[in-house]
Amino acid sequence: CTNCGPRFTIIKDIPYDRKKTTMSIFKMCSQCQSEYENIEDRRYHAQPNACADCGPQVSLYQNKKRLEDIDPIEEAVKLLKEGKIGAIKGLGGFHLACDATNNKVVARLRRLKNRETKPFALMSPDLEKINQYCEVKKKEEEWLINQSRPVVLLKKKKNNLISPLVEPNNNCLGVMLPYTPLHHLLLKDNFTALIMTSGNIADQPIIGDNQEALEKLDGIADFFLLYNRDIFNRCDDSVLKIINGDNVFFRRSRGYVPHPIILDFKLKEVLALGGELKNTISFSKENYVFLSQYLGDLKSVETLNFLKESIVSLKKMFKINPEIIACDLHPDYLSTQYAE
């Protein structure tokens, strides 16, 4: 979709033309080409225009083999209902998914991901299902249905169907609605909620590459639901909470990056490298500040490399050549060492 579909995650360079995105390998069929060229069509000049014949294809892998002669999405639903854990390729990277009402599989996911108490995000098919296990106020509902589809922190209802292991130490749950057709097809009429937690190894960033997912998540996921369009810029989910009527971002990422923060004064071209934990970087240019997507904790070479990738990508995207680099004074931070 041109309004809520991929853009930042597939763009390699500007201007935003198909040939400069990861859609470039998919040649439009005659029908899609006709839509693209017809000024009266709603898909006129929609750069990622594609259909089931000429666009990206979905596949399912299990036991290191691609399953043939099956519907990948129907098979994924079946496996999730059986209590399996799936690595599912989303818009900006992989999620590890399982049935959020199944205590046994949630406990297994915690053990395999080495994540004792940190909460898992949930995805439900619609507001009706969310209202079964969370209190949803009007402002929270507005953000849940926003086209950017952030994870919204909501107060849990008592005696709900969600496994207590999803969020063992808090009275809130992080919940989002589907934001890709794949998500809608998985969830519709099938689940109250799925856990949709970042597909990564502890202390490493979200995985976006198919082969890397098949290798690194092999010991966690029972199956892999993939598609064959590359993710160029990985981008994790955004997280917010409504506090005193205002939305407060705990993580500003998918759906908001690289939309700038606009200031009422001008700055020099600066690269700010952020802190060690929950890192994001930012660039300033004139009266704009461009924040990167959420990068993670800078505790590993993989996350530092992700930071470097983001610097290259944003510099290229916004034609910024920083005169100043800002960093923390802590000498042991990887961001500080990189700045120096």
Image (tube, helix red, strand yellow):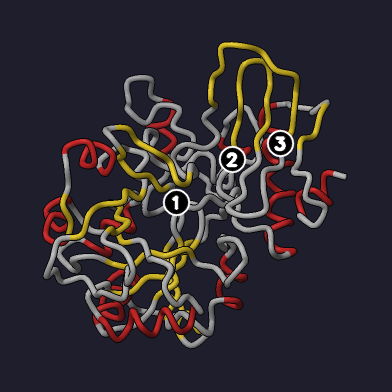
Q: Residues within 10 Å of mark 3 (few under 14, many from 20)?
A: many
Q: Secondary structure at mark 2?
A: loop
Task: Give residue 182's position: percent from left, percent from top.
Answer: 34, 58
Q: Looking at the image, tell me whether mark 3 or mark 1 is earlier in sequence order.
A: 1
The image position of residue 176, as x and y in percent, is 30, 52
| Tag 2 and tag 1, C-beta contact below 8 Å | no
Residue at point 50%, 67% (across, down): 199
Does residue 134 appear left or right of residue 171 in this picture?
left
Q: In the displayed structure, does residue 175 sit left or right of residue 264?
A: left
**Disc 3 element:** strand
| The image quarter in which residue 320 lies | top right
Q: Is residue 59 visible?
A: no
Q: Which residue is mark 1?
A: 237
Residue that mark 2 sits on = 11
Q: Position of residue 102 (x, y in %)?
A: 24, 80
Residue receiving disc 3: 272
Quadrant the N terminus occupies: top left
Q: Please, what is the three-letter code of the amino acid marked with disc 2?
A: Ile
Whether residue 157 appears in this view of the structure is yes
Q: Nearer the viewer, mark 2 or mark 1?
A: 1
Instruction: Please tell me which residue lies in front, 39 or 338.
Output: 338
- Determine crowd level at label 1: few under 14, some 14-19, many 20+ residues with C-alpha closer than 10 A: many
Quadrant in the picture for residue 243: top left
Q: Look at 29% across and 83% down and name the residue there.
A: 83
